[in-house]
Amino acid sequence: TRHRQYQVRDLLTQLELEKDHLEERVKDRTRELNRSVRFLEQFTYSMAHDLRAPLRAIRSYTGLLSEDYAQLLDEQGRRMIGKVESAAGRLDSLINDLLSLARLSNLEVPLLPISVDSVVDGVVYALDEEIRRTDAVVEKQRCNLKAFGNPVILKQVLENFLANAIKYSEPRGRPEVRIWAEMHEGRVRVCVSDRGIGIAPEFLQKIFQPFQRLHGHEIPGSGIGLAIAAQGAERMGGSIGVSSQLGEGSTFWIDLNSSVNLPAHVEAASVA
Ligand code: ADP
């Protein structure tokens, strides 16, 4: 029996050592992984940044060509210049989106209690032109809820949801969008729903990854908006999600901590 006891004791010591060793290895790997992620983020940022200068030159020279030399070109030549201009425009917005994505991961994000209603007002105001152009019906429901987050990032996330709701409703006619917020499992959930083209179930998770688009150039976009929204939500300690029925419409939401348990002296921030 004594011999057995010694054996068990040795085994336990051995197990403890193995556990320590494993924990050290996990820490090392995590450090390595964080280093690679930081490197990739910085690489994306500087690449996107450096692509801007030559693109600016391409855009300004094609602009000059189509303004000052259009009469020297035939119809086909002018059409070609037009195509170069629109491709350069798409590349420009892609680079801007990439820069926003990279900036978001490097940025310090101060969190504070925010009034969801005032952020929603700011979002609808910012997209006023698009709403008018498409004759969209946007229904906002007051919620009087306070979330704990960053007003600028929340506004950016909801702007992306609302712009998409309008954009992906247009092929089906007049966009009808509803924005509301509710408490969901102790957190504040802000939802944007539309009656647009919807998304097939097999693509529901894919669309949150950068550059994943379900459409060609017939619907403009870079495929980065939702990746930025997901990154933004994560930086605020929240998350985003979607439910959708193909051909029926979609509901996108962001979940944030509620600021109910925060000290009362902290004032709710509003978005200009
Ligand atoms: P994009 O610039 O292409 O709109 P996003 O990252 O914002 O990029 O969205 C990724 C893809 O998710 C879109 O290309 C589209 O296929 C799909 N999507 C996003 N919002 C909606 C919506 N409200 N209804 C239908 N599809 C949507």
Image: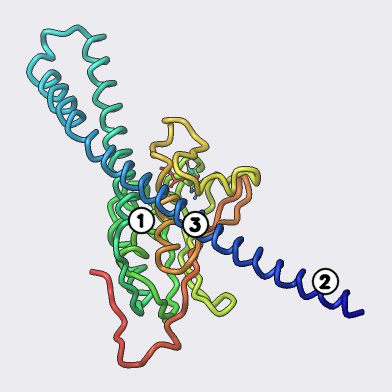
Q: Residue at x 28, y 39 (%)?
A: 48
The answer for how far apart the CA atoms under marks 1 and 3 are is 22 Å
**Which residue in the protein does label 3 denote?**
28
Q: Which residue is drawn at 21% across and 30% down?
A: 55
Image position of 140 (left or right of 21):
left
Q: Which of marks 2 and 1 is in front?
A: 2
User: x, y (%) of residue 265?
Assistant: 30, 92
CB contact under 8 Å: marks 1 and 3: no
**Which residue in the protein does label 1 denote?**
105
> Which secondary structure, mark 2?
helix
- Which tag, 1 or 3, sits closer to the chain's start? 3
User: x, y (%) of residue 162?
Assistant: 41, 56
CB contact under 8 Å: marks 2 and 1: no
The answer for how far apart the CA atoms under marks 3 and 2 are is 32 Å
User: x, y (%) of residue 63?
Assistant: 14, 25
The amino acid beneath tag 3 is Asp
Image position of 200 (left or right of 214):
right
Image position of 106 (left or right of 7):
left
- Which tag, 2 or 1, sits closer to the chain's start? 2
Q: Nearer the viewer, mark 3 or mark 2?
A: 2
> Which secondary structure, mark 1?
helix
Task: Determine crowd level at label 2: few under 14, some 14-19, many 20+ residues with C-alpha closer than 10 A.
Answer: few
The answer for how far apart the CA atoms under marks 2 and 1 are is 51 Å
Residue 172 position (above or below residue 177): above
**Which residue in the protein does label 2 denote?**
7
